Amino acid sequence: MKIKFNQYASIPVALLLIGIVLMGFTLRDENSKTNETNAVPVYGNWKNFTKADGLPGNKTYAVHTDGDRVLVGTHEGLAVYENGEWTTYTTEDGLSHNGVIAIDVNEMTGDVWLGTMGGLTRWSGGNFEVYTQMNSGMPNDLIYSVVCDGKDVWIATGGGAGKLDTYTGVWEIFTEENAPMHEPWTYSVCAGGGKVFISAWGGGVIEYTKKTGKFRDYVDPDGNMEIDLFPDDGVVHDITTGGAWSDGILWIATYFGLSRYDGVHWKGYFDHDSGLASNFINYVYSKDNVAYVCTDQGLSITDGDTWVTYKTNENDANGKAIITKGDDKSEKLFSPSISHNFILGVDVQDDVIWVATSYGLSRGERIN
């Protein structure tokens, strides 16, 4: 009986050992998944859309995914891609202007907000409502950026930044008269961490704390307009063109490089010391810990350490992704590649990326 007892007693021990081994494999699998999830994505299986495929025009300024549909701002109107078909909306349908530069969707209401070359448009319930300087008191009709933040809609314009309280319909305007800006020209607004960040021409980045209503500015400490004299001392240049906040990180685009700010430390990136496609940056978008950088010479995706830069050939539709990590560099060839190297907008939903360029829209799928 004693022997039988030991034999049966050994079964739970064996099961425990098996469980530990399996748990080890599970932990390794989960770690592998985590590492894969946190890796800088690589996209392929590119498909390009131009006027011949249903876009109203080839020049695309902005793209925003909204569930099963894709909203694209073009020079010839708003293009909506849904169920494999394109639908175009123009001033004849109620848009304030056909040149749609910026798009955002209010998560609370589902309303689509469109920043155009001639005013702000809200698309709600199939109806278009136009906001201009004349009928609403917003700062300027030339709108470069729009972001929905709860009940508020923020815009960056050629005449300052504005905040619309959609409950009251009242605008609040921010210029050099009431905020630390050098001049009223603003290029971008983004929100996160209880703050709004305004990218201002020649004025760096203006941080607005929503709880206190207080401002502070971040400018290039060395004040040099040509080069970054002291690396990582602040934003790389005062001419800022875009901002993106996610995962506690603020990414700032300029015409002279890229900046990353974690709330304490700044880090600058340039085309000569990283995998950045070009120092001339039009727009930046971020998701989790990854930034998607739209330049005049390609699209760069980075976590600050690894870079994946997409470029298309000048003479055909083929191209490549250049993967850079420190001194290591490799390439992946694509046929076709992104539609054009002058990138103006980007958005990501799940494993699909949409890229707005000066000649067509590109769709890619994650392959790593």
Image (tube, helix red, strand yellow):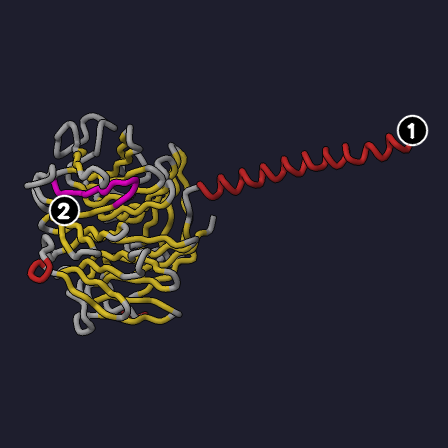
Amino acid type for the residue under numbered disc 2: Thr
Residue lying farthest to the right in this orientation: 1
Residue beneath the point at 17% across and 36% down = 214
Q: Nearer the viewer, residue 103 or 269?
A: 103
Residue denoted by label 1 = 2
User: Secondary structure beneath disc 2?
Assistant: strand
**Residue 253 visible in this rendered orientation of the protein:** no
Q: Nearer the viewer, residue 323 or 219?
A: 219
Q: Main secondary structure of the magenta part?
A: strand
Does residue 328 sit above or below 360 in this rendering?
above
Does residue 214 sit above or below 114 in this rendering?
above
Q: Position of residue 152 (x, y in %)?
A: 23, 52
Query: Would you say 171 lies left or right of 326 here?
Result: left
Does residue 147 sit above or below 96 in this rendering?
above
Magenta residues span 191-202
Name the disc covering residue 104, or none. Answer: none
Residue denoted by label 2 = 186
192 falls in the magenta region:
yes
Amino acid type for the residue under numbered disc 1: Lys
Q: Position of residue 111 (x, y in %)?
A: 28, 61
Residue beneath the point at 12% across and 30% down = 223
Badge 1 density bin: few <14, some 14–19, many ≥20, Cα 10 Å: few
Query: Would you say 13 lies left or right of 337 here?
Result: right
Residue beneath the point at 15% across and 37% down = 238
